[in-house]
């Protein structure tokens, strides 16, 4: 039988002044890379904290952090609402895209300009350092034109097209916040979903009518200029794949060509954005014990690829979120979400 971890929770101000600390056993924490959602956990009523404070929760081999957004006080406890540090990405900026830089260096330049070297020092985040962990050439460009864009949208694009992930860690003792930007952990792991150590499982594959595998792309300013891209059975995107996916699900789009950009480059960026790899086009949830020795959930990383085997069928997917509660962990794979609010937010971002 699993023994629930005891979590040490530290509270400190955004300029790293110690506020308070406590220990709790039944700690809840949720993180979804595809949605900057609120989570909640409970602490004793005597613990001091304010809206906007940071927290860090540690227990053995897990380390969580977040930003306090709401506090609900009762007689014996407080319910804390929080958001992950991805919250800092949810900002609209004037962006000029630079495909000559690696994807990681480009993302770092945006964060540095907004939060590290901003001429308005009040916007700079105390202790923030942005680190680049890998180098990925921006061979597909970006499916954005120069203009005002949400920074989180750009990071999601970098994740879904280039496999690049941003990971925030907090070290109160060093008064530091580190944002590491780099390729996700490459080690593929396998979960046998039919085994008894899996308490619950959900596998949803995106419907064929929504899974586009062919796209016609037209130049908005000259519709005689067009390109056709296909997604092959190997998930590679090209103008003439060696293997075709059938039945054919096609769509047509218009694109604007950015300053100094060629139609070919813009069309490829759009194709890579819309014809996503099948490992993203699913929703798989696996629930197990926190200390499960087969799945080892605390050793898994956002963006890490996985093979989920159910009824002798193997599903390729990628880890995008997790929930810790009452000694159990739910690992969330793929980019499909079923909650109405998340669906609407994703649709709103695309539009």
Image: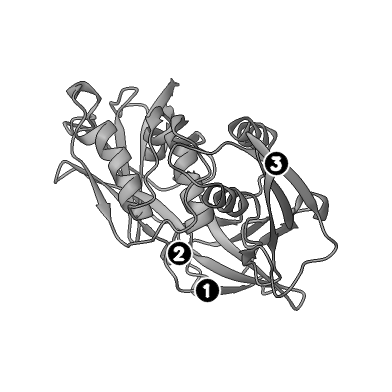
Mark 1: few, some, or many residues within 10 Å (few <14, many ≥20)?
few
What is the secondary structure assignment of the residue under circle 1?
Answer: strand
Where residue 70 appears, x then y in whole percent? 43, 23
Front in this rendered view, residue 273 or 292: 273
Q: Earlier in the sequence, mark 2 or mark 3?
A: 3
Front in this rendered view, residue 211 or 97: 97
Q: Residue at x 38, y 53 (%)?
A: 103
Please indicate, yes or no, whether residue 327 appears anywhere in the rendered image.
no
Front in this rendered view, residue 323 or 105: 105
Where residue 274 appears, x then y in whole percent? 64, 49
Mark 3: few, some, or many residues within 10 Å (few <14, many ≥20)?
some
- Do residues under tags 1 and 2 come within 8 Å of each other at their CB atoms? yes
Question: Which picture quadrant has residue 246?
Answer: bottom right
Instruction: Identify the mark at residue 189; answer none if there is no mark.
Output: 1
Q: Which residue is mark 3?
A: 253
Mark 2: few, some, or many residues within 10 Å (few <14, many ≥20)?
some
What is the secondary structure assignment of the residue under circle 2?
Answer: loop
Instruction: Identify the mark at residue 300; answer none if there is no mark.
Output: 2
- Do residues under tags 2 and 3 come within 8 Å of each other at their CB atoms? no
Where residue 34 appears, x then y in whole percent? 54, 45
Where residue 134 appears, x then y in whole percent? 32, 62
Residue 287 left/right relative to 107: right
Q: Residue at x 18, y 39 (%)?
A: 127
């Amino acid at each position: 039988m699993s023994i629930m971890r005891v979590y040490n929770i530290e509270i400190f101000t955004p300029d790293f002044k110690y506020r308070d600390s406590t220990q709790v056993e039944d700690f809840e924490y949720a993180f979804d890379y595809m949605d900057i959602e609120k989570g909640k956990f409970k602490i004793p009523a005597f613990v001091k904290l304010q809206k906007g404070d940071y927290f860090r929760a540690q227990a053995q081999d897990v380390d969580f952090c977040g930003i306090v957004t709401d506090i609900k006080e009762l007689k014996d406890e407080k319910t804390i609402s929080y958001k992950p540090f991805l919250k800092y990405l949810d900002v609209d900026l004037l962006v000029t895209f630079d495909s000559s830089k690696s994807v990681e260096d480009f993302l770092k330049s945006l964060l540095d300009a907004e939060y590290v070297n901003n001429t308005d020092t009040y916007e700079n985040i105390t202790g923030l350092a942005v680190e680049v962990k890998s180098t990925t050439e921006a061979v597909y460009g970006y499916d954005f034109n120069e203009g005002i864009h949400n920074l989180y949208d750009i990071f999601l694009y970098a994740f879904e097209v280039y496999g690049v992930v941003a990971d925030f860690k907090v070290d109160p003792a060093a008064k530091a916040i580190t944002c590491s930007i780099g390729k996700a952990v490459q080690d593929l792991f396998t979960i046998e979903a039919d085994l008894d150590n899996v308490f619950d499982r959900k596998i949803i594959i995106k419907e064929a009518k929504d899974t586009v595998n062919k796209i016609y792309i037209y130049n908005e300013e000259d519709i005689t200029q067009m390109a056709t891209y296909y997604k092959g059975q190997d998930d590679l995107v090209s103008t003439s794949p060696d293997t075709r996916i059938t039945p054919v699900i096609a769509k047509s789009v218009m694109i604007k060509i950015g300053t100094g950009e060629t139609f070919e480059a813009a069309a490829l960026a759009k194709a890579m954005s819309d014809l996503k790899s099948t490992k993203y086009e699913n929703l798989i949830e696996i629930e197990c014990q926190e200390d499960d020795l087969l799945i080892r959930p605390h050793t898994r990383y956002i963006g890490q690829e996985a093979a989920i085997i159910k009824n002798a069928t193997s599903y390729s997917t990628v880890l995008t979120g997790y929930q810790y509660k009452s000694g159990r962990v739910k690992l969330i794979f793929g980019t499909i979400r079923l909650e109405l609010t998340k669906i609407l937010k994703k649709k709103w971002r695309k539009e």
